Amino acid sequence: MKAAAIQMISTPRVDDNLTQARALIAQAAQAGAELIALPEYFCLIGLRDNDKLAIAEPLADASHPASVGTPMQHILAKTAKEHGIWLIAGTLPIRAPGSDKVYNTTLVFDPQGHRVARYDKIHLFCFDDGERRYDEAATLRPGQEPVAFSLTDRSGISWRIALSVCYDLRFPELFRHLGDKHPLDLIVLPAAFTDTTGKAHWELLLRARAVENLCHVLAPAQGGRHENGRTTYGHSMIVGPWGEVMAVQAEGAGIVMAELDQTRQKQVRSQLPALQHRVLSSS
């Protein structure tokens, strides 16, 4: 299955970001990608952390996302259907009932434009090195449920896919839990890693998660200097089940593509049956 990770440098303007995202999706679909993933906060990186609260949407109906009140979800569903692709829509702010905070939510749309999965980011990023300070808990409510879903590609092969977001990458128990009953074929991790933490840990952790689970990893990212002065690390990446980097883009908007191969994955798991050798449960 050909998959694409889209890299962006999102702005404080939702319409501009959606226009760019749709153009990159169209380009990836034309190149043959049937699974396309957008980065975290693809719809907005505001001038202030709480700007996301102003554009937050309620969760739309799964089968028929209405355009009134949920314009971003409507456009995403329409785009997936238009190109006949599976679209993992990075993250967008979804209102948390009874709260002034929002969920940082990944939505998945099938080739008919129906929402088939929702994941609310569980682990909220916090970092302070004396120069830069981030505290997602100030505006976000953490999710509670790990989420994986299954899709059948155009050749009839089924894929078990784990959803995760950015800071989740640092918590291997999340992926162990998701793969307990059914081994994962793919981990998808939209991100907006900081330049500082990205240089130190991004590739290292992506490759580690691939090796631990003997599966593919698809990681679309924000990659460049944003209008709020923040620099995101980029390096959107696709990693194979042996931990090999299959494709990467260092910075700037663009598309990273690779052919995901379950035959290769089965070969790796046969040669090194580590998943069968686990003794301790993740639960």
Image (cartoon, helix red, strand yellow):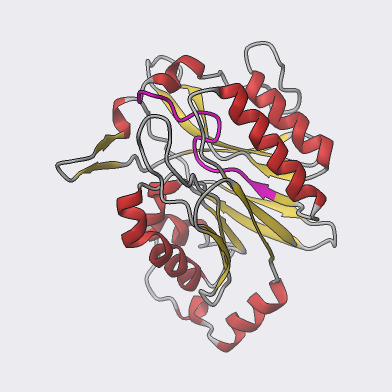
Q: Is residue 119 left or right of residue 31?
A: left
Q: Residue at x 61, y 55 (%)?
A: 161
Q: What secondary structure prevails in the magenta region?
A: loop
Farthest bottom residue? 271
Farthest top residue? 68
Q: Where residue 92 sits in the image (x, y, percent)?
A: 53, 30
Q: Where residue 14 sits in the image (x, y, percent)?
A: 56, 23
How many numbered badges does the structure rendering display? Answer: 0
Q: Point out the stretch of residues depicted in magenta.
A: 36-49
Query: Is residue 109 among the parts visible in the rendering?
Result: yes
Query: Is residue 283 among the parts visible in the rendering?
Result: no
Q: Is residue 212 left or right of residue 20?
A: left
Along the viewing direction, whichever of 46 and 267 lies nearer the viewer: 46
Along the viewing direction, whichever of 47 and 280 lies nearer the viewer: 47
Query: In the figure, 22 relative to 258: above or below?
Result: above
Q: Is residue 204 left or right of residue 272?
A: left
Q: Where residue 126 sits in the image (x, y, percent)?
A: 26, 41
Query: In the figure, 215 relative to 158: above or below?
Result: below
The quadrant of the rendering that contains the N terminus is: bottom right
Q: Tell me which corner region of the image, top left, top right, bottom left or bottom right, holds residue 208.
A: bottom left
The quadrant of the rendering that contains the C terminus is: bottom left
Q: Residue at x 43, y 47 (%)?
A: 166
